[in-house]
Each structure stands twice: as structure tokens, then as C-alpha cells.
Image: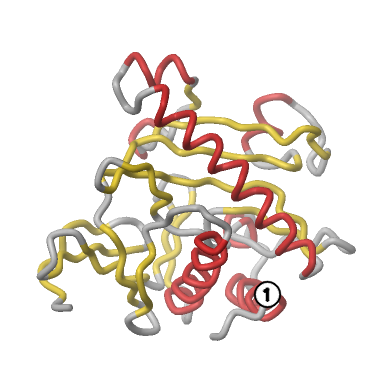
Amino acid sequence: MEKREELYRGKAKSVYTTDDADRLVLLFRNDTSAFDGKRIEQLDRKGMVNNKFNAFIMQKLEAAGIPTQFDALLSDNEVLVKKLAMIPVECVVRNYAAGSLVRRLGVEEGLRLTPPTFELFLKNDALGDPFINESHVQAFGWATLEQLAEMKAYSFKVNEVLNKLFDDAGLLLVDFKLEFGVFHGKIVLGDEFSPDGCRLWDKETRKKMDKDRFRQGLGDVIEAYEEVAHRLGVPL
């Protein structure tokens, strides 16, 4: 597989074309951003940790019957993936109240949500990734109702699989975001699953083990990511 020109440079990953029209290479960088890119820092080892963490999680999801973009690890910082037509909607599943839900509704952080909630956000940094609903998705043509129903079903299936995985590792899966795309007419889970895009707390202490350590200036960001990876058995 030949890596060619850079197609897109995001906040934490770069996307490259290949000699296969159906495949891309993702490069996980050490860039770490928060507040829609207003704060950016370099954190040593972050690209490597997230790349290997994502590969581990995506393979677990594939084994559970959830189609993903992941194909193969290429190096510490690179992964081969399917080229998806991305849907510009983020799907968020929440098991406990945290982040924007606490700010919007004034509820207590850590409140357990029964059943877990499902939310949609438009993927648009310039607008601050606004909260949207299913009618918006249909009206603006971002996805069909059938695609949205699949995305929702897959999101809850991901929650079921990963809740057990993290629980066995002594962690609470507080919430997470997913992005989906279309590959040869089928909905496929894309982007990444890493501590950058979810909230993970230690079950006993409620210590934050995710990107909130960066957002809130708690320090030891990559050390926390590495501890989560170690608990899960991710080979780093």
C-alpha cells in the first residue's frame, strides 16, 4: 500500500490518499486540542497511544458485529482504513451526566442516566458543534432516516460492548461520541475511539482518565491514557 498526498489535516490526525481508491492512511499526531481548537498543545506519545488504543477498540467492535473503518495498523502512528463518505453528525451516548449535559441542564456531574441517553450534534467547529435533532438531520439531508436508525442502533451496541470491556478494567464509561460514514452503500463506524473522544473514570475513585485532564488542566494526560490502555491490555 503506497501512501500518497495529504488529503485533510484535522486537529489531531492527518488523512492521506493511497494507491487504492477505497483506502486511506490516518496519521495520529501528538497535537492535543480543546475548546474547538482554541487551545492546542503537543503531548509526547499521544499519537502512538491513541492509534494503538483505537486499533484495539475497533477490533473488539468488529468482533461484536459492528462494521468499522479500521483495516490494519501500519506503524506506531499510522493506520490503514476504508475511505468513507462521512456523515457530518456526531452521535453521543451518555451513561452518566458530564460535560455539556451538566452545563445545559444544570444536573449534578456523575448522575447515572437510566436508560443511557442518545444525542446528535452537527460536526462543525465554526459553529461549536451545535446540538441538533433527528428532524434537522433529515431536513438538511445529512443522513436518511434509515441511516440514522442504523447509526443509533450501532451506537447503543457499541455502548453495550464497551461498557463491559471498561467495567472489567475497573473503569466507568461515562460518555462517548461516534462518527459514521458510508462505504459501498453501508453505514460504517469511522474516525476513532480513544480517550480523546470519550469520558472514562476510575470506578472506585472517580478519577478522570480521559481528555478532561487536558481540558481542565489536571495534568498527567498521557499517563492516564496509558494507564487505561494497560488496564485493557492494549499493546503499546
Image position, residue 114 (x, y; %): 81, 33
Q: Residues within 10 Å of mark 1 (few under 14, many from 20)?
A: some
Q: Is residue 92 above or below residue 27?
A: above
| Residue depicted at x 58% and y 58% | 64
- Quarter the N terminus occupies: bottom left
Image position, residue 8 (x, y; %): 21, 56
Numbered marks: total: 1
Q: In screen coordinates, is 154 left or right of 188?
A: right
Which quadrant would residue 207 be assigned to in this image? bottom right
- Quarter the C terminus occupies: bottom right
| Residue depicted at x 77% and y 63% | 171
Image position, residue 25 (x, y; %): 25, 69
Which quadrant would residue 17 be assigned to in this image? bottom left
Residue at label 1?
Answer: 232
Q: Is residue 21 above or below residue 45?
A: above
Which quadrant would residue 78 be assigned to in this image? bottom left
| Residue depicted at x 13% and y 78% | 2
Q: In screen coordinates, is 51 left or right of 212?
A: left
Q: Is residue 166 above or below residue 118?
A: below
Q: In screen coordinates, is 42 left or right of 107?
A: left
Q: Secondary structure at mark 1?
A: helix
Q: In screen coordinates, is 151 left or right of 210?
A: left
Look at the image and name its color scheme. secondary structure
| Residue depicted at x 32% and y 27% | 142
The amino acid beneath tag 1 is Leu
Q: Is residue 135 above or below residue 193?
A: above
Front-most of residues 157 and 218: 157
